[in-house]
């Protein structure tokens, strides 16, 4: 089965670098913190010199943490270096040589790897979150005791009822609608635990268009936070669980760009060597982003989007391209086609629509100061359009944009594409 990329020895990748500096020009982190070693060029030099355990000191670790894995540099590199995989390769060796910190080890290996336990911890967190300082509406401020660097961040509340507790395993089209196709739904942690209404809207819309949706409850986290931290061993165990959960389904749809990218990359991360490599490649080929599925697989025409229960009256929107959708999955037109087809909705492009919002998973918490500065550029671009709402297809970007608009005292709504389609 065809595989575009694979994990390669990072020394080999770093050795290809010409030091031309094209990657530094587009790197959002480097634009905020103009240290040579926060962009790929400088890090490649560090990576090429790495020999053993002693080289992974605190400074080295920080430099390799300060990458959003946004992929902005990938298209620029004349050598075609997979800078994201190089960074992950270095992080993996750091974990092998020095281990994970206690907190990450407990979270990744004890909590996130076990879906039932993860759910229990979040239910407890839901009960405790009432003690966090309240913000506007369903937003809380993450106080300093949760993250010294992320202090003041607005985070949406954990949902009182998770998606998995609100849907049946099989959701069939309503009476009178013929079943055209059966797909699996990959929920992802953000939609399952924080934004379950996105999942419900996706299911409703799909059902109305003849899609039977199967939501296997054995599925877990896509494992990208774990892989991103360099713990590929735990990531692989989590990936195996997902591949098994969906083994009887031919297509799997997700409303999270980050999960979609991670799932499509299982073959890249784990497709080499061992027996299960073929299983990961097969699984990766089944994955579809929600907008990709609607336009490419279902071939929905503009009139299909007029039949939704949600009516809009001259809603001006602008669209933020998640890095994990546009760069890693090559999907930019499909969400725009969906947005542009919804009656009463206008799409106004913003400057830098494809520039990273600065979230980058745990980067947004660990390096909140840098993350805020990157996100503020996004807020200014949104303001410039005069739009009433920002639409995106990634719950992580949505959280980041909610935070940055709040800090900039902007009142625009931040919507997932499914919000445009269903009430
Ligand atoms: S992936 Fe993004 S943050 Fe990382 S080096 Fe490339 S441009 Fe910079
Ligand atoms: S663009 Fe590629 S070759 Fe040029 S400095 Fe960056 S990583 Fe090296």
Image (cartoon, rainbow, N blue to C red):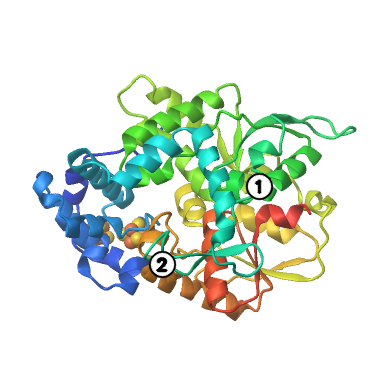
Residue drawn at (67%, 44%) of the image: 161
- Labelled pair 2, 1 in contact (Cβ < 8 Å): no
Question: Disc 2 and disc 1: Cα gap in Å?
Answer: 26 Å
Q: Residues within 10 Å of mark 2 (few under 14, many from 20)?
A: many
So how many labels did they put on this image?
2
Q: Position of residue 170 (x, y in %)?
A: 72, 29
Q: Is residue 224 left or right of residue 30?
A: right
Q: Which callout, 2 or 1, points at the residue further toward the start of the chain?
A: 1
Q: Which residue is mark 1?
A: 196
Say if 6 sits above or below 33 in the image: above
Return the x and y of residue 393 as percentages of the image width and height: 59, 54
Circle 2: element type = helix
Q: Residues within 10 Å of mark 1 (few under 14, many from 20)?
A: many
Q: Say which element carries label 1.
A: helix
Q: Quadrant of the C terminus?
A: bottom right
Q: Is residue 210 left or right of residue 100?
A: right
Q: Nearer the viewer, mark 2 or mark 1?
A: 1
Where's the N terminus, which quadrant? top left
Instruction: Please determine whether, in this image, residue 130 is positioned above or below residue 231.
Output: below
Residue 206 in view (yes/no) = yes
Which label sits on residue 371?
Answer: 2
* Between 138 and 306, the one nearer to me in the picture: 138
């Amino acid at each position: 089965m065809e595989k575009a990329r694979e994990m390669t020895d990072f020394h080999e990748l770093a050795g290809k670098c010409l030091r031309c500096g094209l990657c530094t020009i587009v790197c959002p982190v480097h634009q905020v913190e103009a240290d040579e070693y926060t962009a790929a060029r400088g890090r490649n030099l560090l990576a090429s010199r790495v020999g053993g355990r002693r080289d992974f000191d605190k400074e080295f670790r920080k430099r390799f943490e300060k990458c959003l894995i946004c992929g902005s540099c990938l298209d620029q590199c004349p050598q075609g270096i997979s800078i994201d995989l190089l960074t992950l390769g270095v992080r993996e060796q750091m974990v092998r040589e020095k281990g994970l910190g206690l907190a990450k080890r407990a979270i990744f290996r004890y909590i996130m790897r076990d879906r039932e336990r993860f759910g229990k911890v979040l239910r407890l967190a839901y009960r405790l979150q009432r003690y966090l300082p309240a913000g506007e509406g369903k937003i809380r401020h993450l106080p300093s005791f949760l993250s010294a660097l992320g202090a003041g961040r607005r985070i949406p509340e954990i949902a009182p009822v998770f998606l998995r507790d609100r849907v049946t395993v099989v959701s069939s089209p309503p009476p009178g609608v013929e079943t055209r196709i059966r797909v699996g739904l990959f929920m992802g942690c953000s939609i399952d635990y924080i934004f379950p209404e996105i999942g419900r809207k996706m299911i409703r819309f799909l059902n109305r268009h003849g899609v039977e949706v199967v939501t296997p409850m054995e599925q877990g986290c896509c494992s990208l936070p774990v892989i991103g931290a360099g713990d590929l061993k735990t990531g692989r165990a989590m990936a195996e669980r997902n591949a098994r959960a969906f083994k009887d389904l031919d297509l799997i749809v997700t409303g999270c760009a980050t999960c979609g990218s991670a799932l499509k990359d299982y073959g890249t991360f784990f497709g080499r060597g061992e027996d299960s490599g073929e299983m990961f490649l097969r699984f990766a080929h089944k994955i579809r982003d929600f907008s990709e599925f609607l336009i490419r697989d279902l071939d929905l025409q503009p009139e299909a989007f007029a039949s939704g229960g949600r009516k809009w009256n001259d809603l001006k929107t602008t669209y933020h391209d998640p890095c994990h959708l546009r760069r890693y999955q090559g999907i930019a037109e499909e969400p725009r086609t969906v947005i542009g087809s919804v009656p009463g909705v206008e799409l106004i492009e913003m400057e830098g629509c494809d520039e990273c919002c600065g979230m980058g998973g745990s980067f947004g918490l660990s390096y909140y100061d840098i993350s805020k500065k990157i996100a503020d550029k996004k807020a200014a671009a949104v303001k410039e359009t005069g739009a009433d709402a920002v639409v995106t297809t990634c719950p992580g970007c949505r959280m980041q944009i909610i935070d940055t608009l709040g800090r900039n005292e902007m009142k625009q709504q931040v919507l997932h594409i499914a919000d445009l389609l269903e009430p």
